[in-house]
Image (tube, helix red, strand yellow):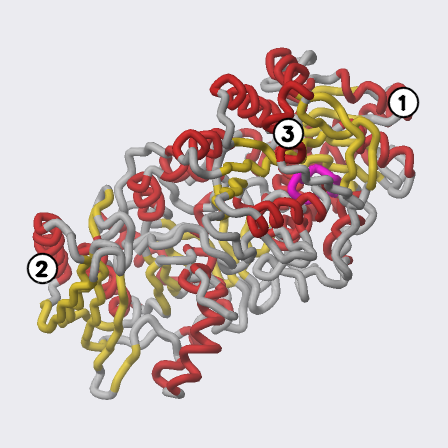
Amino acid sequence: MKKISLELGSGGKSMRDFIARTIVPAFKNPMLAELLDASHLPGRIAFTTDSYVVDPIFFPGGDIGKLAVNGTVNDLVVSGAVPQYISLGLILEEGLEWNALEKILRSLKAAASRARVEIVAGDTKVVKQGQGDKIYINTSGIGKVIAKPRPKLIRPGDKLILTGTLGEHSLAILTARGDFGLEARVQSDCAPLTFLLPFWKNGVLWMRDITRGGLATILSELTEKIPYPLLIEEDEIPLSKAVQAASELLGIDPLYLACEGRAVLVVPGEKTHDVLARIKKNPLGRKAAIIGQVEGKIGRPGELLLRTSAGGLRLLEPLSSELLPRIC
Amino acid sequence: MARTNEFRDKKVIGALLARIAENKRSLPSPCRIMEVCGTHTMTVHRYGLQSMLEKAGIEMVSGPGCPVCITPGEVHEAAIRLVTENENVILATFGDMTRVPTHLGSLQNAVPAKGSAVKIVYSPEESLDLARQKRNKEIIFFGVGFETTIPSIAVMAKAAAGEELSNYSILSALWLIPPPLRAILESGEVKLSGFLYPGHVSAIIGQEPYAFVAREFGFPGVIAGFEPGDILLGIISILDQIREGRPRVANEYTRVVRPEGNPVAQALMREVLEPKDACWRGLGVIPGSGLKFKAEYSAYDAEVKHDLRITARGIDLPGCRCGEVLRGILPPSRCPLFAKKCTPESPCGPCMVSFEGACLVHYKYRGPKS
């Protein structure tokens, strides 16, 4: 008998296939079928929803509450919308400590204030002990559309800007879980990306927050939408020392690690340096870098290429199977 | 961010490649080098060295250096039977072992008997902890490995014996690297110019076990590390050996490998284990190529304890050609199943499962079509 496997939630190829073949056909709605981070509705409204099942619920640099606000806020930002209102669905497990819940509520409030969104609707359910794991959160978000991502205008020579270092969120979760006996002083990068909103007015053609599946998966998805290959330079990708060391040690590729406060942008070639300089002025964009470009000379349409630190070229595939379950 | 590592720096790599191309020009073509170790295969492809080396006139061939891959299907099936046919057995093993397809499916899809389970562990030590904690379960560690991993598995048997743990045993598939090299050279199926010997295995066994390759077969070889620069330095050494007509066991990984290897680990292996003729997937039975527990440790040998009687033939599932890949006679991309029916999501053989399996590495890190 066919059963649901963890792989279907990985953010990788298996999950995309699952959504495209099983979920989308069940509803046959063109707005849903676009598979954007947020759907653009009539009346310049963007709408999105996301559920949070992160384990553990508290981790260095954040908790499930902060994540639940920022994740939904970021989906709106990268869809070209100013986040405005958020709903909050709580599924609590019998036996969850009261203090933990209060701490999470405070954290939800703080994250909402920082991202300038209001929590305006909510729901609470409690399930028996063992039928859930402490707390799951669903947030839906509404935003005002200020721009539409324009992947069709992307041309060779356009640059890819990454707003910061990769993989801290994944590593913070791993450390908090004590998996692999790993000890690292690393904080999740969980943060709102609202500081990127003004760049929609500066000619940015496309942006995505880098969540499950990591940079490689997200850029692979972009190659499906444009008739040109993308090339990224391994040496240009900002990595913290902790992520670098842990990746070497565990044989994990940081290109597939999740973040919760980083984005990748496609910027027309001539505007790149101006946009980069302004992103770097924000504390959340200090480590931003030009990591590659839309290619006109090498590669074929649909390909995501990596120039390795040794100078070789290879293809990057989307994440295929589950790396780390329940990281968000 | 620039990685300050000279072993993978573009300029250093470029210079080494130029030297390889120059040295190669003076040699009769072709130059085909087998990277014996799966981790070498990973470096070659992960850094995109394959195509750069081809331009320099060097063809890299992947060898039998993936323990998950060369373990015959019958051993994987024995593990599946242990957990499906016996109650209260916990079969502990490394993650990729659970996904190897066999006639009985895989450990991942197996339906364990009542009270039994498959548990993924990250180190042999974890399996021993399980045995200490769950005295009412039989813990069987399914351990595979080359000389690098074998000492850590041998230690488990010793510790279990010391603690008189009666609920612990090891289903082992322990492989030695030098014997298959002889088998490959004797068969002459693949025309090679030299071997890159695995750095980690060599750190345990030292240089001497490879000496027969140069002495009996007049064949070059070099112990190499796992950075791109290490591999290229190794290739330069092989080209030098060919040009000078002086085949030997060179060591380009002196920062880790001592000529005598690691005597402590060697002594431990000798204390607990003894050689046996073993059947490899694709290569068949190779004399003295495996290790088994000595009689005094048989209480911890799952084959003895559970009377398994494994008759391995080392043949692939229908359609799968992992055996030929492991012998170096079939490049993964020429297998008709590669990237079509056989992918990391639905692997048809172990070489597409193991993280150092040649097919998975060739798939994951393939270069752009030229």
Span of residues in magenta: B62-69
Residue B217 is left or right of residue A1, and the answer is: right
Residue visible at 80% across and 33% down? B180
Q: What kind of element bears circle 1? A: loop
Image mark for residue B245: 1
Identity, as a three-letter code, of the amino acid under mark 1: Gly
Identity, as a three-letter code, of the amino acid under mark 2: Ser
In this rendering, the answer to whether B111 lies above or below B20 is below
Residue visible at 14% across and 72% down? A85
- Residue highlighted by disc 3: B230
| Residue toward you, A44 or A128 | A128
- Residue highlighted by disc 2: A113
Identity, as a three-letter code, of the amino acid under mark 3: Asp
Q: Earlier in the sequence, mark 3 or mark 1?
A: 3
The chain that hosts pointer 2 is A
- Provide residue B171's location: percent of width, then percent of height: 62, 36
The chain that hosts pointer 3 is B
Q: Nearer the viewer, mark 1 or mark 2?
A: 2
Q: Could you classify mark 1 by the number of other residues whose Cα lies within 10 Å: few (under 14), some (14-19), or many (20 or more)?
A: few
